[in-house]
Image (spheres, rainbow, N blue to C red):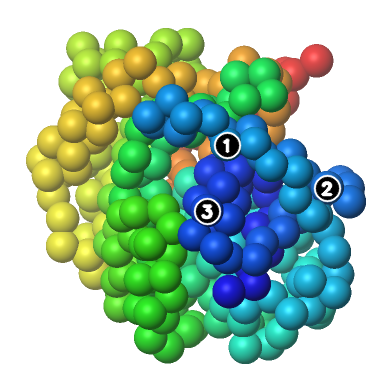
Amino acid sequence: MKITVLGCGALGQLWLSALIKQGHDVQGWLRVPQPFCQVNLRETDNTVFNASLMANNPDFLAQSDLLVVTLKAWQVSGAVKALAERLPASSPVLLIHNGMGTIEELKNLAQPLLMGVTTHAARREGNLIIHVANGITHIGPASSCRQDYSQLAAELHHALPDVAWHNDISAACWKKLAVNCVINPLTALYDCPNGELRHRHDEIREICEEVAQVMVSEGLHTSAESLFLYVERVMESTAQNISSMLQDVRQQRHTEIDYITGYVLRRARAHGLTLPANTRLYEHIKRKENHYE
Ligand code: KPL
């Protein structure tokens, strides 16, 4: 397949290297245009993959069978809209990011839209991307697109296993959203790795209770207890991680809070619910962002 990967950070380079190794014809797309993009990735088995790839080639984009988007949530809709005119209308756009709300922003996109959430962990160390842990990428159609792309999921699974196809992706997205609503703002608040939240049961429970209320109002089957247990599992399996939000805050970058807690608060308002714990966290992170130098 011909595939363009928009966003060449840790997750983008992980996908680029996996797709090349599987024999796909790929290019990177950087938001600041460059003719080449560098892939330097250390795999989970310590092998290193280096390549210099074509980037930002509009002719390649016009022939691409798939656009994979690995940008931060707040960068997605602007960047995708800017490329959509040149991408064939039949080529799907697969979004893989933390948080929700980009599907609504891209509801008028001509191309079929797919959403993905992943538990692969990758982080940057200088110029090297480290694939810290393998995981699962769940993908499925955005609500406006009900086509069956299970074959595409199978193709992606060969490149970077595991990939699971879901005819309805919303449960997987909300489950990941619940994890991010707890771990991301709390680690940014306490300036600690994920595992150090393990003693903050009461705060975690409160957040899970509020997110569960919204999820139930959205028609999903869940409970505060099952979210709590799931968050605890992720917290333990990523105990050494510095969450993406804490990394953003430490480097004074724009965070994904508007697409994580902010999205849950917007859905809560639509259902007439108020979420005091999530509101406090949202306001805290926004205050931090507003006080960057
Ligand atoms: O997705 C993550 C993030 O940091 O954004 C978690 C799951 C919390 C892992 O750190």
Q: Quadrant of residue 95?
A: bottom right
Query: In terms of depth relative to the viewer, which is nearer, 216 or 58?
Result: 58
Q: Residue at x 85, y 74 (%)?
A: 59
Tell me the SS state at disc 2: strand
Query: In terms of depth relative to the viewer, which is nearer, 69 or 145?
Result: 69
Is residue 278 visible in this depiction of the protein? no
| Dot 2 crowding, Cα within 10 Å, few <14, some 14–19, many 20+ | some
Q: Quadrant of residue 93?
A: bottom right
Q: Which residue is under mark 3?
A: 21
**Marked residue nearer the N-terminal end (1 or 3):** 3
Q: Residue at x 47, y 11 (%)?
A: 191
Q: Is mark 1 within 8 Å of ligand 1?
A: no
Q: Residue at x 77, y 72 (%)?
A: 61
| Dot 1 crowding, Cα within 10 Å, few <14, some 14–19, many 20+ | some
Q: Which residue is under mark 2?
A: 36
Q: CA distance from mark 1 to mark 2?
A: 16 Å
Q: Which residue is under mark 1?
A: 49
Amino acid type, mark 3? Lys
Q: CA distance from mark 3 to mark 2?
A: 18 Å
**Marked residue nearer the N-terminal end (1 or 2):** 2
Amino acid type, mark 2? Phe
Q: Residue 237's x, y, as percent? A: 25, 27
Q: Quadrant of residue 69?
A: bottom right
Q: Quick check: marks 3 and 2 in contact, CB under 8 Å? A: no
* Residue 78 numbered mark, or none: none
Q: Residue 182's x, y, as percent? A: 34, 32
Q: Residue at x 80, y 54 (%)?
A: 55
